[in-house]
Amino acid sequence: MTGLPDVGGAPDTAGPSWVVPDLRHPIRAIGRRTFDFDHRIAVMAIVNRTPDSFHDRGATFELDRAVAAAVRAAEQGADWVDIGGVKFAPGPELPAADEIDRVVPVVEQLAQQSDVVISVDTFRPEVAAAAIAAGASVVNDTTGLSDPRMAAVVADSAATIVITHSTAPPRQRLPEPPRYDDVTSSVVTFLQERVDRALAAGIPDSRIIVDPGHDLNKNTVHTLEMTRRLPEVVALGYPVLAAVSNKDFVGESIGRPRGERLAGSLAVATVSAMLGARIVRMHDVAESVDAMRMVEATLGWRAPVEARHNT
């Protein structure tokens, strides 16, 4: 007996200290930037034009604040800025036209001021099409192509698609708490099925990214187990996005309320990167960029900015 609680998941086994994914296309041209995901962990910043976002509580809802936050994130070293007009969690219906009015002006203004990769966080094909026309080069679909028209929109463009695992219909609660016989196997099966849907629609391998959906229709124990077993998601062969920042599983794991989860978020982003994730979606940009650049330096992928100590 160890005296430790049973938190689920496979027993501990010896393994590599870090995971280098075997990617179908590690070199990715996304928007105006190119990434070598064999040796690079991209930081995706978050800008929400929503009055009810779970973290910032509407701090960037006004257009000028949203644009300023997006530009500042790029200046702080973000590789990517993800712009959303509707949060994933359940809430009142917002017409597609209103969502377009929220996200497209931010995309347009950011594209004029920076070469940072711009993604739009939406499950609506019409919003995705409008954002791509305005300058977005990624569609971050947190419902995993739940609307089959989304695949067609992306296929008809040069955009990359992020396919995320989630099980509830958009903006609706599950009728009961989520249950899985094996959460990671369920995630991997779902993602493979949706990748096949994307390929069938004409989206090439080189424009697909997968996201296991931390906390999305999962409880904290599910999310922690899935994170430990992230190499099983990585084995699909596509760059993995880990959207971990400030989420409830972080708060519940360390007993921290919203606003006090930075250290926990950086820790799980680092673990995710070591286990093969190649994009981390984060609120605190400067700290997250430093953490990922340090991971790269430690693993020998990046030379130190300077190496004067004891020389």
Image (spheres, helix red, strand yellow):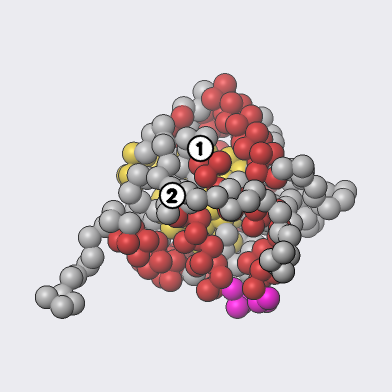
Instruction: Kindly identify which residue carries mark 1.
Output: 235
Which numbered disc flags the more N-terminal residue, 1 or 2?
Answer: 2
Question: In the drawing, what numbered circle is on residue 3?
Answer: none
Query: Is residue 121 within the magenta segment?
Result: no
Give the extent of the magenta segment: 255-261
Compared with 38, 73 (above or below) is: below
Q: Residue at x 37, y 61 (%)?
A: 295
Residue 187 position (above or below residue 105): above
The prevailing secondary structure element of the residues shown in magenta is loop
The amino acid type of the residue labelled 1 equals: Ala
Residue situated in front as seen by the camera: 158 or 267: 267
In the image, is 95 to the left or to the right of 188? right
Asked if one can make out residue 89 in the rendered structure from this viewpoint, the answer is: no
Distance of label 1 from label 2 (alpha carbons):
14 Å
Q: Which residue is drawn at 71% across and 54% down?
A: 8
Image coords of residue 77 (percent x, y): 36, 63
Name the residue carrying label 2: 16
- Expressed as whole percent of the image width and height from the top left, the position of residue 151 reads 59, 31
Q: Which residue lies furthest to the right in this view?
A: 175
- Of badges 1 and 2, the one in the foreground is 2
Q: Could you tell me which residue is drawn at 51 percent across and 67 percent down?
A: 267
Residue toward you, 210 or 173 = 210
Query: Is residue 171 placed above or below 63 in the rendered structure?
Result: above
Mark 2 residue type: Pro
